[in-house]
Image (cartoon, rainbow, N blue to C red):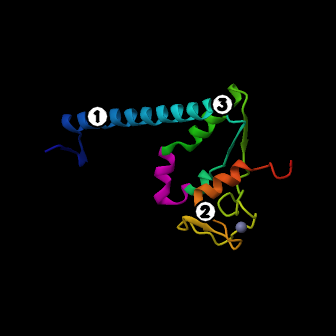
Amino acid sequence: MNKKGGSYQKTKNIAKIEKKIKKLHRKLQNIRLNHIHQTTSKMVKAKPSRVVMEDLKVSNMMKNKHLAKAIANQGFYTFINQMNYKCEKYGIEFIQTPTFYPSSKTCSNCGTIKKDLKLSDRVYKCECGFTCDRDKNASYNLANYGLEKAS
Ligand SMILES: [Zn+2]
């Protein structure tokens, strides 16, 4: 059949399908980039006084085989860079927290750090009685980042 010296030769059909797949990948990439552009524009147009973003520890997450692809695909770096660029353009303060800032583990109500918070804990429950959606709690911490000392 399509064998030459033990190595396998592409048929015209395979080459055609490969071309189609490449085209689809480019299309997906464009959709993702468009989404990032639109989302970051929308956020900047809301005229926030400042934007605080996390360093997403991408290199750490890449070690997790299941997360690696999803994270690479979502283009977090592109998102952060776009946000940084647009904030600068519109005179909005852009802040990035240090890599190991515990935004999820910190109670946004009392400041206690919950060391044993697991990724599966979707609700943050603190000993002070504060209960909150995990991501919301983290976003409160980011919103208040650096403000405590100023007041
Ligand atoms: Zn608390």
Along the viewing direction, whichever of 52 and 84 lies nearer the viewer: 52
Q: Residues within 10 Å of mark 3 (few under 14, many from 20)?
A: some
Amino acid type for the residue under numbered disc 1:
Lys
Whether label 1 touches label 3, CB < 8 Å:
no
Question: What distance separates the C-alpha of mark 3 from that of mark 2?
Answer: 32 Å
Q: Quadrant of residue 109?
A: bottom right
Q: Residues within 10 Å of mark 1 (few under 14, many from 20)?
A: few
Residue 2, numbered circle: none
Report if the beta carbon of the residue with label 3 is closer than 8 angstroms to ligand 1.
no
Among the two numbered marks 2 and 1 on one chain, the one whose residue lies closer to the N terminus? 1
Q: Which residues are magenta?
A: 62-73
| 68 inside magenta stretch | yes
Q: Residues within 10 Å of mark 2 (few under 14, many from 20)?
A: some
Asked whether residue 115 is in view, the answer is yes
Q: Main secondary structure of the magenta part?
A: helix
Amino acid type for the residue under numbered disc 2:
Cys
Report if the beta carbon of the residue with label 1 is closer than 8 angstroms to ligand 1.
no
Q: Is residue 2 left or right of residue 119?
A: left
Between label 3 and label 2, give the one nearer the viewer.
2
Q: Is residue 17 above or below residue 120?
A: above
Name the residue tied to disc 3: 85
Q: Is residue 136 left or right of residue 1?
A: right
Name the residue tied to disc 2: 132
Name the residue tied to disc 1: 20
Q: Secondary structure under badge 2?
A: strand
